[in-house]
Image (cartoon, grey):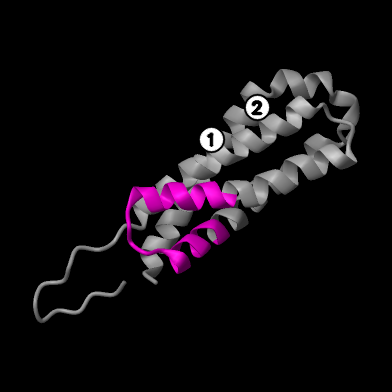
Amino acid sequence: MNVKRFFLAAVVVFIVAEVLEFLIHGVILASTYEALKDLWRPDMESKMWIYPVIGAIWSLLFVYIFVKGREGKGLMEGVRFGVVIGLFVGIPMAYGTYAMIAIPYSLALQWWIYTLIECIVLGVIAALVYKPLPAPAAGSAASE
């Protein structure tokens, strides 16, 4: 594993994920969340610092799993990885929450769809940043 490319990919994935999370939850779903404000913790704002921490850990793990399974097949590999991870994390998160908390089904469905889309975008980002290195010149060594 190329450590520099790994950390660069994790940082870029983290930044893009944070932007997407803001767009999804802070813009697109904001009115839905406002209508359901009685469901959320009254002290939720004081706990929002947890989200970037989770995002950083998640980004490191996302890129680590991508790198360890990478076959060097380009952007479509990132798309495929994003679909698998989006299904893997999106379905249990969205529908598990739907089963436990009185949220409308439409919100669970949107969470699942947005998670899938976000993971596909992040998979493509990981594939772009952690792309195969050019073939080394004869007689020189390059690390993967």
Is residue 71 shown above or below 100?
Answer: below
Residue 93 is at least partly visible in this image: yes
Could you tell me if the residues under marks 1 and 2 are in contact, i.e. CB atoms within 8 Å?
Answer: no
71 inside magenta stretch: yes
Picture coordinates of residue 85 (x, y %)? 57, 52
Give the amino acid type for the residue marked by disc 2 in the picture: Gly
Query: In the image, 92: left or right of 7?
Result: right
Picture coordinates of residue 106 (x, y %)? 75, 25
**Mark positioned earlier in the residue sequence (1 or 2):** 1
Give the amino acid type for the residue marked by disc 1 in the picture: Val
Q: Residue at x 49, y 53 (%)?
A: 81
Crowdedness near tag 2: few (<14), some (14–19) or many (≥20) residues, C-alpha within 10 Å: few
Magenta segment boundaries in residue numbering: 61-85
10 inside magenta stretch: no
Residue carrying label 1: 19
Is residue 114 shown above or below 57?
Answer: above
Is residue 101 shown above or below 65?
Answer: above
